[in-house]
Amino acid sequence: MSKEFKACIIGAGAGGLSMARALKRRNINYDHYERHSNVGGVWDQNNPGSAMYDSAHMISSKTMSGFMGFPMPDDYPDYPGHPRILAYLNSFADACDLKDKIQFSTEITAAKRLDEGWDVTLSDGTTHHYDAVIAATGLAWHPRMVEYPGEFSGEIIHSSKFRNGDIFRGQRVMIIGAGNSGVDIAAEAARTADAAFLSMRRAYHFIPKHVFGMPADVFAVTGSILPMFMQQWSLALVLRLINGDVTRHGLQKPDHLPLNSHPIVNSQALHHMAHGDLVPKVDVERFEGNEVVFKDGSREEVDLIVMATGYQHKIPFVDESVVDPSLDHPDLFMRTLLRSDPSLASIGFIEINGGVYRFYDEFADIVANYYSDLKNGNSANVEAFQAIVKSGKFDVSGKVNYVDSPRHEVYANVLESAKQVKKLRKKMGWKTLKDADLAVG
């Protein structure tokens, strides 16, 4: 360890800003790098490689989505669009006085693990030494494409290249994948394309953005005192009352309970299916020229395919001896600290069924507590925490029987995450984090 503990934060999106605030609160020295010219990460459409499309909105409500101690403005709608989220992230960085520490337009080309600490090389060719590295680079940067048998004669793009429905005009369009971005894009295709199809490997539960007049995640909190299986059955009943039998639209019947997969929070897709403007299809079997053949034997002529097939969770600049690039995602304790080497952390490598910014704050504070113990030479706490990190304890998945997909391998449950964070803090003797502790202004 160096004489004075110093950390390196890479990325100035929401996760990087949360981490910077946590280190600043603990008086832990750090450098902060961002390859773009401003904060915001994926929410800034001007950030090269951002997958943000024009109509993108948060799928968690403003009520549940703000940073701790810094709620979203009262005049924001229930589900803010990306310009408002970008403005919110800028106002957060300004209010917490974080921007002066960020070295913008600086990319990290390599992070090499040494016997003591890390050597981090910047795009200007200089190398700097740190005791710890935090990769706050997020999930939506390395598109995952899916291959199917046969040849397709039309155009195929990944959803990360989609910006608005203008590209669909005059075309027959198919979206592959029913994540939230895929369903959003399918709804745009329903409005602008000559024909629109949504291909799904499995059935999903469609959750409307408002349930009984309140944002869906706010409604969900009212049932959070129930055991998980009762929450799931209760939600299934509510969805049946609101949506009816979705198989009447041609959708497959879900073979799993709600919350066993990432929630599709969308009020438009079922509307367009009910009007015949969006046609659900099963998984693709093969391509034949301009036709797509599906596993149920049906086929459709298609001009353009949008693959909303997710992203690989990569940290490409990190030493391959630390993070195996052949793996789809690194093995992270609480989706935050590398189990095999907790000197590497990541804020933002998490999929969760609710507002994530509060959990960035919680996990960032846990990392900051660990760094504080390292800095102050609290060896007993350091050894105890490192043993916990390398163990299989404090699972944030909620022991839910998630459907088999890459995104669910890094999934976290909101209620279980809060429970495990509380248990960890108690075991380590770390103070509970409260909104009042982080209030700005």
Image (spheres, rainbow, N blue to C red):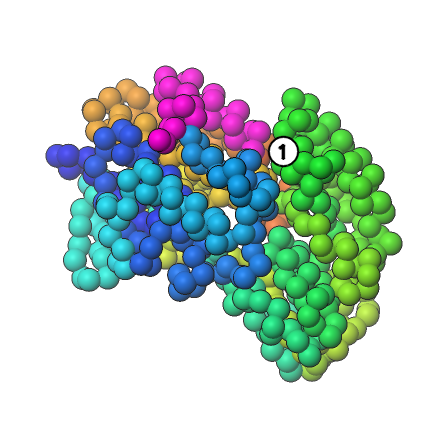
Q: Which residues are magenta?
A: 414-441
User: Which element carries disc 1, helix, strand or loop?
Assistant: helix
The residue where tag 1 is placed is 218
In the visual, does 248 lie left or right of 339? right
Q: Is residue 411 visible?
A: no
From the top left corner, tell me how far across and down residue 308 is, in percent. Answer: 60, 61
From the top left corner, tell me how far across and down residue 140 is, in percent. Answer: 48, 55
The one of 213 and 142 positioned closer to us in this rendering = 213
Residue sitting at x 56%, y 56% = 56
Q: Amino acid at mark 1?
A: Val
The one of 103 and 402 positioned closer to us in this rendering = 103
- For residue 95, above or below residue 145: above
In the visual, does 313 lie left or right of 145? left
Residue 105, quarter of the rendered image: bottom left
Is the N terminus in the top left, top right, bottom left or bottom right quadrant?
top left
In the visual, does 199 lie left or right of 345? right
Q: Residue furthest front?
A: 75
From the top left corner, tell me how far across and down residue 206 is, in percent. Answer: 72, 47
Is the C terminus in the top left, top right, bottom left or bottom right quadrant?
top left
Q: Residues within 10 Å of mark 1 (few under 14, many from 20)?
A: some
Residue sitting at x 66%, y 76% = 169
Residue sitting at x 35%, y 26% = 385
Residue sitting at x 80%, y 41% = 242
- For residue 53, above or below residue 349: below
The one of 310 and 288 positioned closer to us in this rendering = 310
Residue 152, quarter of the rendered image: bottom right
Residue 323: in magenta span = no
